[in-house]
Amino acid sequence: MLGESQDQELAQALSVPRALPPAGLEARAVAAMREAGERRARRRQWLLCTSAAVAIVAIAFGSLAYYAANKPSAFRRRVLAAAEGATTLHSWGQEGTRDFETWVSDDGFRRRETRAGGAAVALSLEDEEGREIYYRPGGDEAGPLAQEFYDPTLRHLDSFLRPEDSPVTWAVWADVAVCGSAADRGQHQEVNGLGELVEVWEWECVLRDNCHIGDVACREGDRMWIRAEVDPDTGRLMSVTRYLWEGSWTVVKWAEYEWDAPIPEEAQDFAFPAGTAITRSVAWADLADQVIRTDATRDWQVTVHAMALNRHGDIGLWLSRVKTEESQVPRRYDSAPPLLVDAEGSSGERYTQSNTFSCMNAFGAGYWTTALRRDDPGPDPGTVTLTIWPYNEGVSEGQSVTFGDVPLPPREEVGDVFEARREVVQH
């Protein structure tokens, strides 16, 4: 058990009512969605009456002897197995002070909208081809922030997932992941105010990294309490609530879930407001299929996709690393160190790698850009030799590939070859 005062704080936190989705998110109001909304409202009514009683039961019977001996991994196996075959996942809730609504479909479509005080904060849309848009109406002093970009890691999603997985099950896994060491409080069943039998899974964990949940900053070492409700008949996730211990248990995120609901047509597309300046960063859409050189270590397939020289003779590189079938790197790893590059020209010219990068890492793959600064001015060599360490830590430390005599392209009259491949268009 937790200490008595902490358990009482949990009881108080459980008794706090949670608001329904804001009126601004009523775009999903098709017939099936109205029915789900009515069901959510009924659940809210009984939540106020039963949550305190549930917490009291947890206090009185808080020993592991009362709860079934299940670990968070058992919970994840249950909800992931139940998510197999789902066509869509609709979730809504609150992170910190912000409301959110998310749609995910099994074909790779994803939409997420966040609001604060009823006003739109951000919207992102992603399709199965890897193209994404992001819009933040508030933006900055220059106006709204609007971006369109391409995420090449999505092409590795199918190979990364198990055969029975889909983008829907991946979304569930991300929502129930425990980022720290977990102390299990097990699983029990209870009857809710509607007379329905539900499963309740609970555990406490200590965060191992700094992170943000909405606009709430969480720190390494913080304690988090997680409570999930599952449909006992289908095993599908119904809700997840996360509490952060800050002298009392405070709700930092809650989410509820609806399965196999049709995605409203108006949610499947988005048009930027007229006059919006959109920054397009879609170079990877073409470059991801381009190969200059490729080779593999035991753990990583390393590819040079493109090279460009700026007006000073500095080299811009587009690189990727993808886990091999023999890779000993864990299926889900916690860090994404940059690829390290050593370069020497055919006439002895030396280059120093910049400490700034851009990257996209997911699904066992990483796509990076990095710059190699010319140490001394002078004519460009005809070729360079590149030695690349794709992931120089853990089980992959020391693994490298070398590409000799890689031809250099001519210089471009630009200072930043990466920025030159972005464009700003007026919608």
Image (cartoon, rainbow, N blue to C red):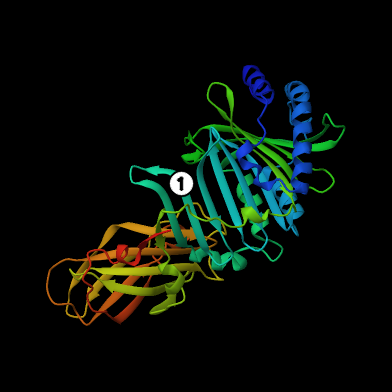
Q: Decide which of 137, 314 is in the foreground and name it.
A: 137
The residue closer to the viewer here, 317 or 210, is 317
Q: x, y percentage for residue 74?
A: 72, 47
Please report the residue visible at 62 percent of the width from the left and 21 percent of the height from the top. 6
Between residue 277 and residue 132, name the one nearer to us: 277
For residue 71, what is the image quadrant?
A: top right
Q: Residue at x 32, y 64 (%)?
A: 418
| Number of on-image labels | 1
Give how far across and how far down residue 176 sits, in percent: 64, 45
Residue depicted at x 37% and y 69%: 318
Q: Position of residue 64 (x, y in %)?
A: 74, 31
Q: Is residue 176 above or below residue 6?
A: below
Residue at 63 percent of width and 17 percent of height: 5
To which residue does mark 1 refer? 136
Q: Is residue 415 above or below residue 406?
A: above
Tell me: residue 329, above or below residue 227: below
Q: Is residue 404 left or right of residue 48?
A: left
Write down the quadrant of residue 278 in the picture.
Answer: bottom left
